[in-house]
Image: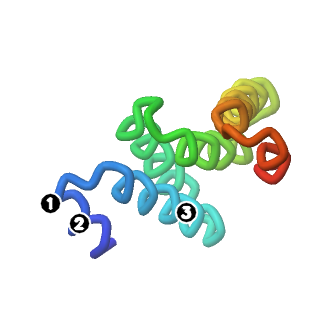
């Protein structure tokens, strides 16, 4: 959480969103689901579609915490982010390395 505060002060948006995703993972793994959800949602809000590496992880985290219908929507968003990342890799043989 200290790193998150530091990145916030420095306006390092990517690193801030990444820390929030990691905190979401930590809270999820320790059973603090409400805190996990808030961190994943905040990461997505900060990313605002700019950091697809953040988006797919945060959407995946939200998916595992929700019922099937809601989870499916989050999984679709995560898959979209991953596919977009893969499409933007300029070496076709390398795109297979990203999932």
Determine the residue positioned at 71% across, 31% down.
87
Measured as percent of width and height from the top left, residue 85 is found at 65, 37
Q: Quadrant of residue 26?
A: bottom right
Tell which of 28 and 50 is nearer to you: 50
Q: Residues within 10 Å of mark 2 (few under 14, many from 20)?
A: few
| Lateral position of residue 45 relative to residue 34, left or right | left
Q: Secondary structure at mark 3?
A: loop
Q: Are marks 2 and 3 in contact (CB under 8 Å)?
A: no
Q: Which residue is mark 1?
A: 9
From the viewer's perspective, is the residue at label 2 or at label 3 nearer? 2
Determine the residue positioned at 51% across, 51% down.
34
3D distance between C-alphas at marks 3 and 1: 26 Å
Q: Are marks 1 and 2 in contact (CB under 8 Å)?
A: yes
Determine the residue positioned at 31% across, 72% down.
3
Measured as percent of width and height from the top left, residue 10 is found at 16, 60
Can you see residue 70?
A: no
Specify the label residue 32 is tagged with. 3
Q: Secondary structure at mark 2?
A: helix
Q: Is residue 46 above or below residue 70?
A: below
Total marks shown come to 3
> Mark 2 or mark 3, which has the lower sequence index?
2
Can you see residue 89?
A: yes
3D distance between C-alphas at marks 2 and 3: 20 Å
Measured as percent of width and height from the top left, residue 7 is found at 25, 63
Q: Residues within 10 Å of mark 1 (few under 14, many from 20)?
A: few
From the viewer's perspective, is the residue at label 3 or at label 1 nearer? 1
Specify the label residue 5 is tagged with. 2
């Amino acid at each position: 959480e200290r790193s998150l505060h530091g990145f916030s002060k420095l306006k390092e948006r990517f690193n801030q969103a990444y820390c929030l995703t990691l905190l979401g993972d930590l809270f999820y793994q320790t059973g603090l689901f409400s805190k996990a959800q808030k961190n994943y949602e905040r990461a997505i809000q900060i990313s605002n579609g700019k950091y697809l590496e953040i988006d797919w992880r945060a959407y995946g985290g939200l998916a595992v915490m929700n019922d099937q219908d809601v989870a499916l929507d989050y999984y679709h968003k995560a898959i979209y982010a991953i596919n977009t990342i893969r499409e933007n890799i300029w070496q076709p043989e390398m795109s297979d390395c990203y999932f």
